[in-house]
Image (tube, rainbow, N blue to C red):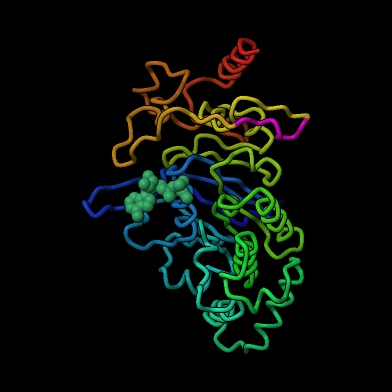
């Protein structure tokens, strides 16, 4: 039996704005991450990816509020735990989060080793500086990072090295699940590859047991993740194995995120990203029917009126559209035939 490290059931959370408006950024989201697996979460900016990450760690501080649903981390239901207890006994060791743009959050006035001391001492009150140094050195060595980085200030490191340092620091307490939020988005292609390689290493070397990789670039996930979940306007629109999500997407939004051209034989080098015209709906007042209807090339009158539920294709695959899978595949095949 596979061991489920993270299970989220029908999680709904909202922001309350200064003007007392509700923004439902995570709307009935369910997911599972098994030991040894990597889940990718994709979707354009504003789809709710970061909010989902914060929500599933029980990280609720105004303006973010928990509404309903369950979060089980390593079997422990944290959805009703107090934030303080979560901080003490869950964050860092059960689950760790590398926020978007985390490399800019390194304290510019502290050397990396002093930053690491701050992190470690917040969790283990009586750990000595010598022990911290040894642990950090060992970890850096395992991950192929030079020891001298420990003595540097963030400003002395390149963007790629800063990001790799942040990732190393995030696994100091050996969390079972690591969530990396757009860890490679701000980097050049070479650094991007190194960051992705490092995330893989974390799994291979047993420093973490499961990974959630968040990005707005769906094709990037193909070589990294086992499964992919695509979010749109706070909801899951597709969940599938990476191969299916990338090469046989069902939801028109997932299809759109993949761009137009895919050549499986050549890996993903020939993917051309084409932007989907339009913008996601305002979550203060989402449309009644399908939230993607406004931008969908294949929209039908029903899409705008009936609420659209997730349709399960099999145990591991689901998508949110009123059209059956064979009809969607026919539409896509015809398009390919027409466009040559
Ligand atoms: N502090 C906030 N107050 C109100 N709305 C917010 C706040 N932060 C994010 N949002 C809204 O929540 C939605 C999801 O945002 P976010 O989770 O950051 O998306 P993503 O990570 O996919 O880019 C967006 O519509 C965004 O405008
Ligand atoms: Mg985000």
> Residue drawn 43% across and 62% down?
59
Q: Give the image quarter of residue 230.
A: top right
The x and y percentages for residue 11 are 44, 49
Q: Nearer the viewer, residue 136 or 189?
A: 189
Foreground residue among 266 and 292 = 266
Estimate the x, y position of residue 304 in percent, counting from the top left. Answer: 36, 23
User: Is residue 267 covered in magenta?
Assistant: yes
Residue at the right extreme of this rendering: 265
Residue at point 51%, 51% (across, down): 8
Q: Indicate the quadrant where residue 303 lies.
A: top left
The reply to whether residue 67 is in sight is no
Residue 61 coordinates in the image, percent (x, y): 36, 63
In-image side of 225 versus 10 (left or right): right
> What range of the chain is rendered magenta?
266-272
Query: Is 97 placed left or right of 14 in the picture?
Result: right
In the orientation shown, which residue stands out farthest toward the top? Answer: 338
Q: Residue at x 67, y 46 (%)?
A: 225
Q: State whether residue 156 is above or below residue 250.
A: below
- Residue 118: say if magenta: no
Q: Is residue 114 visible?
A: yes
Vertical order, 249 against 141 (above or below): above
Tally of numbered tags: 0
| Image quarter of residue 63 | bottom left
Q: Is residue 236 above or below residue 190?
A: above
- Residue 323: image x %, image y %? 50, 20
Q: Is residue 13 positioned above or below 296 on the image?
A: below
Where, quadrant-wise, is the C terminus in this rendering? top right
Principal SS element in the magenta part?
loop
């Amino acid at each position: 039996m596979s061991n489920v490290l993270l299970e989220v059931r029908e999680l709904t959370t909202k922001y309350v704005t200064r003007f007392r408006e509700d923004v439902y950024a995570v709307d009935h989201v369910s997911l599972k991450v098994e030991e040894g697996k990597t889940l990718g979460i994709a979707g354009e900016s504003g789809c709710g990816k970061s909010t989902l990450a914060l929500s599933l760690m029980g990280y609720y501080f105004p303006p973010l509020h928990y509404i309903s649903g369950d979060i089980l981390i390593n079997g422990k239901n944290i959805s009703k735990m107090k934030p303080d207890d979560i901080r003490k006994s869950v964050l860092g060791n059960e689950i760790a989060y590398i926020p978007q743009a985390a490399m800019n959050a390194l304290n510019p006035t502290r050397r990396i080793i002093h930053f690491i001391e701050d992190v470690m001492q917040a969790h283990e009150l009586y750990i000595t500086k010598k022990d911290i140094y040894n642990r950090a050195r060992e970890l850096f060595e395992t991950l192929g990072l030079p020891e001298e980085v420990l003595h540097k200030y963030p400003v002395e490191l390149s963007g790629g090295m800063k990001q790799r340092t942040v990732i190393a620091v995030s696994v100091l307490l050996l969390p079972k699940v690591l969530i990396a939020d757009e860890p490679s988005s701000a980097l050049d292609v070479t650094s991007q590859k190194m960051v992705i390689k490092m995330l893989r290493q974390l799994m291979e070397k047993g420093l973490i047991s499961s990974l959630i990789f968040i990005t707005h670039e769906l094709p990037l996930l193909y070589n990294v993740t086992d499964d992919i979940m695509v979010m749109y306007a706070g909801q899951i629109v597709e969940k599938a194995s990476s191969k299916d999500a990338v090469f046989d997407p069902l939801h028109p939004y997932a299809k759109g995120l993949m761009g137009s051209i895919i050549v499986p034989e050549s890996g993903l080098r020939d993917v051309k990203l084409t932007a989907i015209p339009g913008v996601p709906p305002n979550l203060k007042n989402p449309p009644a029917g399908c939230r993607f209807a406004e931008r969908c090339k294949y929209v039908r009158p029903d899409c705008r009126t009936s609420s659209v539920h997730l349709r399960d294709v099999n145990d591991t695959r689901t998508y949110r559209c009123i059209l059956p899978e064979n009809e969607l595949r026919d539409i896509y095949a015809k398009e390919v035939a027409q466009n040559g």
